[in-house]
Image (tube, rainbow, N blue to C red):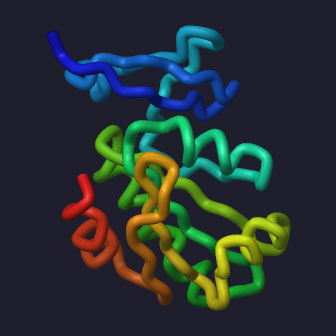
């Protein structure tokens, strides 16, 4: 029997236990029945951040960005494509630092875009600056 992993629902934030061999086969939330993976990054607020970081067993890649940031806007399509390539082995999320200023300050986000990778509730890697999709996927791969 496959090991189960915890995955937070992108819609209702319920924690789901999913057999690891079923992650890529259309897994849905047991509470709201929303697909757990859509191939698109999730937009997180400060309130949802702790739940997604602390309760997902998957690595969570966070793009800290702002709407006025040119490099952030330039990297957005690459981050979208990276979500399609990396799900369901990782969860990709975006945090708007203008709307989540307290979180950005708490985590010491000094420049944007900044990418941070979390696993088991802890930050395990960080890099600053825009990346193309190939570099972004290559940066995440060792942590999968």
Above or below for 122 versus 133: above
Q: Nearer the viewer, residue 117 or 54?
A: 54
Q: Could you tell me how many numbered marks the image carries?
A: 0
Res. 141 image quadrant: bottom left
Above or below for 110 versus 35: below
Residue drawn at the location 83% of the way across and 72% of the way down: 101
Residue drawn at the location 40% of the way across and 37% of the way down: 57
Horizontal and vertical percent position of residue 137 = 28, 66
Classify residue 20 as left or right of residue 118: left
Classify residue 74 as left or right of residue 44: left
Classify residue 22 as left or right of residue 113: left
Horizontal and vertical percent position of residue 87 = 35, 44
Q: Nearer the viewer, residue 26 or 20?
A: 20
Above or below for 86 versus 125: above
Residue drawn at the location 49% of the way across and 69% of the way down: 116
Horizontal and vertical percent position of residue 16 = 50, 19
Res. 27 image quadrant: top left
- For the N terminus, the quadrant is top left
Above or below for 117 versus 42: below
Classify residue 100 as left or right of residue 116: right
């Amino acid at each position: 029997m496959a090991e189960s992993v915890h995955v937070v629902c992108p819609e209702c934030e319920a924690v789901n236990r999913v057999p690891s061999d079923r992650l890529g086969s259309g897994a849905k939330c047991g509470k709201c029945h929303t697909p757990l993976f859509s191939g698109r990054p999730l937009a997180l607020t400060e309130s949802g951040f702790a739940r997604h970081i602390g309760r997902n067993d998957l690595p969570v890649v966070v793009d800290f960005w702002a709407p006025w940031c040119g490099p952030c806007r330039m990297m957005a399509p690459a981050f979208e494509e990276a979500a399609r390539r990396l799900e369901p082995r990782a969860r990709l999320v975006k945090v708007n630092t203008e709307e989540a200023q307290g979180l950005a300050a708490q985590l010491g986000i000094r420049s944007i875009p900044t990418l941070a990778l979390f696993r088991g509730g802890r930050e395990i890697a960080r890099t600053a600056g825009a990346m193309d999709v190939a570099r972004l996927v290559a940066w995440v791969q060792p942590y999968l």
